[in-house]
Image (spheres, helix red, strand yellow):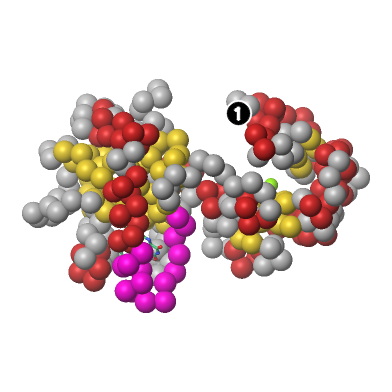
Amino acid sequence: MNDHGVPLALASNSSRSSVNTKISYHQGWRESFSVIIGGDEVRMVKPSPEIFLEAARRMNVEASRCLVIEDSLPGVTAGKAAGMAVVAVPSLPKQSHLYNSADEIVNSLLDLQPEKWGLPPFQDWIEGTLPIEPWYIGGPVIKGYGRGSKFLGIPTANLSTEGYSTTLSEHPSGVYFGWAGLLTRGVYKMVMSIGWNPYFNNTEKTIEPWLLHDFDGDFYGEELRLAIVGYIRPETNFPTLERLKEKIHEDGKIAEKALDLPMYMHLKSAPYLTDSSQLNEHHTSPIHH
Ligand code: RBF
Ligand code: MG
């Protein structure tokens, strides 16, 4: 947005000084906002519209031309009361029904489409994919719900979600892709879902990678290493199993094609994928350590 001259404000109920501290950990954030305003700088905090109206005033733009992006319910209320368009990114998963007064609800910021609101589009999407800061997880392949190969012809090599609570909560649910290393076999293209599989209404978040290769047999128990390099779409529900299956195959085609792009291809040689001596640390990237 900055490159397009669209002003950005950060308006938080937290005190100005704690906002300053928080953003100081992220390079470049301070400079990307033309206005930063804390809860101690207004008379009434959210759900009052005051903080957003004050932010608009300081940016010198009309409220009706502002788009609010909010994760909290009081924030959504405040934005609507200010006469602004509001996109909610609910902080509580599966609570999105509470955010009905928002103009749109997205699962994560990965799904934000500024062009829907008259703003310039994000330009980092490429061939139906969004490059992300790569992240790495691994572990022995476990048996899933037994639906993948049986019902769908989509055999997923599931990872246990035990011990991944931080990694998993740091990454929104959705359909991602990347490279999969099986220590005894090689490195393969991979597309995966992370989340609750709305079609099956799972109660647990699962990691379900589909290795885009025909294997002879199962490999339950084998060590699987994943480098997740990009995002495709949010998880959604489907009217029929057939439609879900079609969509997953489409995801597979998108991933296959995108992984040939140099920007994704180069991660095929990440040591983590093939080197068993690399610690199976799942919270951060072994490359950036
Ligand atoms: N399940 C859903 O309910 N909604 C989805 O949008 C969805 N997308 C998926 C995308 C990919 C690439 C993969 C591999 C799986 C996806 N699944 C989704 C999960 C799918 O239902 C599950 O893997 C199979 O049922 C096997 O358990
Ligand atoms: Mg907030």
Callout 1 crowding tier (Cα within 10 Å): few <14, some 14–19, many ≥20: few
Residue farthest to the right, as pictured = 43
Q: Going by the image, does 270 lie left or right of 78?
A: left
Of the 4 image quadrants, the one containing the N terminus is top right
Does residue 27 sit above or below 157 in this rendering?
above
Residue farthest to the top, as pictured = 289
Corner quadrant of residue 238: bottom left
Total marks in image: 1
Residue farthest to the bottom, as pictured = 240
At a point 57% along the width and 44% down the height, the residue shown is: 122
Q: Position of residue 195 (x, y in %)?
A: 42, 57
Q: Position of residue 45 (x, y in %)?
A: 83, 48
At a point 72% along the width and 40% down the height, the residue shown is: 6
Corner quadrant of residue 10: top right
Q: Is residue 254 magenta?
A: no
At a point 68% along the width and 63% down the height, the residue shown is: 103
Q: Nearer the viewer, residue 200 or 110?
A: 110
Mark 1 within 8 Å of ligand 2, using the beta carbon: no
Q: Is residue 228 visible?
A: yes
Q: Going by the image, does 258 lie left or right of 50?
A: left
What range is drawn magenta here? 233-247
Of the 4 image quadrants, the one containing the C terminus is top left
Element assignment for label 1:
loop
Q: Is residue 282 visible?
A: no
According to the image, label 1 marks what residue? 26
Q: Is residue 241 magenta?
A: yes
Q: Position of residue 257 (x, y in %)?
A: 31, 47
Three-letter residue code for mark 1: His
Q: Position of residue 226 (x, y in %)?
A: 30, 41
Corner quadrant of residue 34: top right
At a point 72% along the width and 29% down the height, the residue shown is: 20
